[in-house]
Image (cartoon, rainbow, N blue to C red):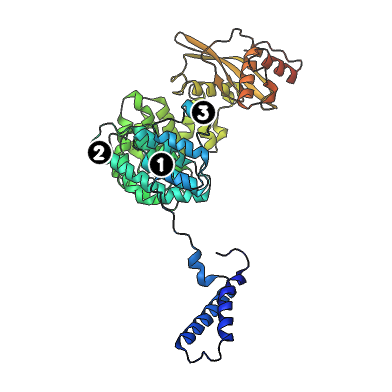
């Protein structure tokens, strides 16, 4: 409507007015003529005024109607400029396919959604999905808005569809809601800060069919604390705390936000919250010791934590006691600093204790004897091996096989690197602490010589960085040693122990 020269809009009223004025003589007595002339004058003046006001008088005519979810996905894709890749992918998913099927291997199966047409097509496909799996796979693209325009469509049109689907699932009598699909819907609503959906988010966090899902960690990690509506959600969840693992996930999120100063009040600082924290600390099941660690991390931010601190300090699990020492130190009590310093002396607890002292700006309290990179490597290795994704427990023994400072090809910097031998029952291995802490659990090195072991780690890192130095030779066992020797001429590679 506004393209080209705006004065062209004066053409037709101008022609009509000119013709009428030329025929003025002898026509003035006609009522129809007078009416037509008045109309032409008003039309001409309106167009001139609108042009001078830069179209403000007719701006309402140029405004687009607010978008709506298309009534039919397939018909919309035929008429609108939906990207062919997305059209084919969504059609495949609606028919019960998967993003991992051979039929779509040539497509981008994890596309970012940028245009409004693509965003509307996604919303229509999500609405038309007839199975939880199809809705899950289609809905995962809600996490990939590629523009503000797409984000707005997902927030205004997509999230009400997610809310409706989640409400239906919670209202059903199904014993198994499919926690992956259902909790992912909660994650969408939370990530978009969709305020109208907060009541159903609260309900889902308390539903025993969903509240033990591991997905709750990702739900709370997706919260944007700077979103203007998020405080409303935090208030709701604080007043009616989640249950099960959802409660622990919310607690971990709240602890981090409170430590970083992004929220002023801890959501568990009330009678119900304190009772829940006490329950975690009194639970003697070693499988839930991490719950007690999370509870202890909240203690510095409670109005009255003395009784709970006593429980944490006497807990059977050492990781809880270390957390209690941090909590004491966080409250400004020197007793906590002394306890953390003592934990630094044991390689089993050194990494966490020394990290806490640095966080508390008290690195001076780390004992001089363990500040050496060799000693710190022992602590790092112990913590890494005990992670649930690795050995899931501390090794029986851990000793340094080799330690040196060299120029490390993946970083092109001189750094300390350490090889450590570990044993756990009948198992054993050698791992590296340095640029990247890692252990190749599936196979022991054929040699105990440090050079080929470092070389294997070197090539592994370069491969992950798509470094051209390994092109065509990533399976060559001698490549890493060659790179290390070239970068460190004259180095004696005998084990230092």
Q: Considering depth in this image, is 99 or 451 the residue closer to the camera?
A: 99
Instruction: Pick out the residue farthest to the front.
Output: 26
User: Dot 2 corresponds to which residue?
Assistant: 172
CA gap between label 3 and label 1 equals 20 Å
* Mark seen at residue 344: none
Foreground label between 1 and 2: 1
Q: Secondary structure at mark 1?
A: helix
Horizontal and vertical percent for residue 137? 42, 35
Does 349 sit above or below residue 44?
Answer: above
Report if residue 380 is visible in the image. Answer: yes
In the figure, residue 73 lies in which quadrant?
top left
Residue in view at x 62 percent, y 64 percent: 4
Residue in view at x 29 percent, y 39 percent: 169
**327 lies left or right of 359:** left
Quadrant (top left, top right, bottom left, bottom right) of the C terminus? top right
First along the sequence among labels 1 and 2: 1
Horizontal and vertical percent for residue 201? 34, 44
Q: Secondary structure at mark 3?
A: loop
CA gap between label 3 and label 2 equals 36 Å
Marks 1 & 2, CB-CB < 8 Å contact: no
User: Dot 3 corresponds to which residue?
Assistant: 105
* Mark seen at residue 125: 1
Does 59 sit above or below residue 267?
Answer: below
**310 lies left or right of 467:** left
Report if residue 241 is visible in the image. Answer: no
CA gap between label 1 and label 2 equals 23 Å
First along the sequence among labels 3 and 1: 3
Horizontal and vertical percent for residue 331? 44, 41
Crowd band around label 2 with a 10 angstrom C-alpha radius: few (<14), some (14–19), many (20+): few
Instruction: Pick out the residue farthest to the right.
Output: 490
Q: Secondary structure at mark 2?
A: loop
Residue in view at x 35 percent, y 51 percent: 196
């Amino acid at each position: 409507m506004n393209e080209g020269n705006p004065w062209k809009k004066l053409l037709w009223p101008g022609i009509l007015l000119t013709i009428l004025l030329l025929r003025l003589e002898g026509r003035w007595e006609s009522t129809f003529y007078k009416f037509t002339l008045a109309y032409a004058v008003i039309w001409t003046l309106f167009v001139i005024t609108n042009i001078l006001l830069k179209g403000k008088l007719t701006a309402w005519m140029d405004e687009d109607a607010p978008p709506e979810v298309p009534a039919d996905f397939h018909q919309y894709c035929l008429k609108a400029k939906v990207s062919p890749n997305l059209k084919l992918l969504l059609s495949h998913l609606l028919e019960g396919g998967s993003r991992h099927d051979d039929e779509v291997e040539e497509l981008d199966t994890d596309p970012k959604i940028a245009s409004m047409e693509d965003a509307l097509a996604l919303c229509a496909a999500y609405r038309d999905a007839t199975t939880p799996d199809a809705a899950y796979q289609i809905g995962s693209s809600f996490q990939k808005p590629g523009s503000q325009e797409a984000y707005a469509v997902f927030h205004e049109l997509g999230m009400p569809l997610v809310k409706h689907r989640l409400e239906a699932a919670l209202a059903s009598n199904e014993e198994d809601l499919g926690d992956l699909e259902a909790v992912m819907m909660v994650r969408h609503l939370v990530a978009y800060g969709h305020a109208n959906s907060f009541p159903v988010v609260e309900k889902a966090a308390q539903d025993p069919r969903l509240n033990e899902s591991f997905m709750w960690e990702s739900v709370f990690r997706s919260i944007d604390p700077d979103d203007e509506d998020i405080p409303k959600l935090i208030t709701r969840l604080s007043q009616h705390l989640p249950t099960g693992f959802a409660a622990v996930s919310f607690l971990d999120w709240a602890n981090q936000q409170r430590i970083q100063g992004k929220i002023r009040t801890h959501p568990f600082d009330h009678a119900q919250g304190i009772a829940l924290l006490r329950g975690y600390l009194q639970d003697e099941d070693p499988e839930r010791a991490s719950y007690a660690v999370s509870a202890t991390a909240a203690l510095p931010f409670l109005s009255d934590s003395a009784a709970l601190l006593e429980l944490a300090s006497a807990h059977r699990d050492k990781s809880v006691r270390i957390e209690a020492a941090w909590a004491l130190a966080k409250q400004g009590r020197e007793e906590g600093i002394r306890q953390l310093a003592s934990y630094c002396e044991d390689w089993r607890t050194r990494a966490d204790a020394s990290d806490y002292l640095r966080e508390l700006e008290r690195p001076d309290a780390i004992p001089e004897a363990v500040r050496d990179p060799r000693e710190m490597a022992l602590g790092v290795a112990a913590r890494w091996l005990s992670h649930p994704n690795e050995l899931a427990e501390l090794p029986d023994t851990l000793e340094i096989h080799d330690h040196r400072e060299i120029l490390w090809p993946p970083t092109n910097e001189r750094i300390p690197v350490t090889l450590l031998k570990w044993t756990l029952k009948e198992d054993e291995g050698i791992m590296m602490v340095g640029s990247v802490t890692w252990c190749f659990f599936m196979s022991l090195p054929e040699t105990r010589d440090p050079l080929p072991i470092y070389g294997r780690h070197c090539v592994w890192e370069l491969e992950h960085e798509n470094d051209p130095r390994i092109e065509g030779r990533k399976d060559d066992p001698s490549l890493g040693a060659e790179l290390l020797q070239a970068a460190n001429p004259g180095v004696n590679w005998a084990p230092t122990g």
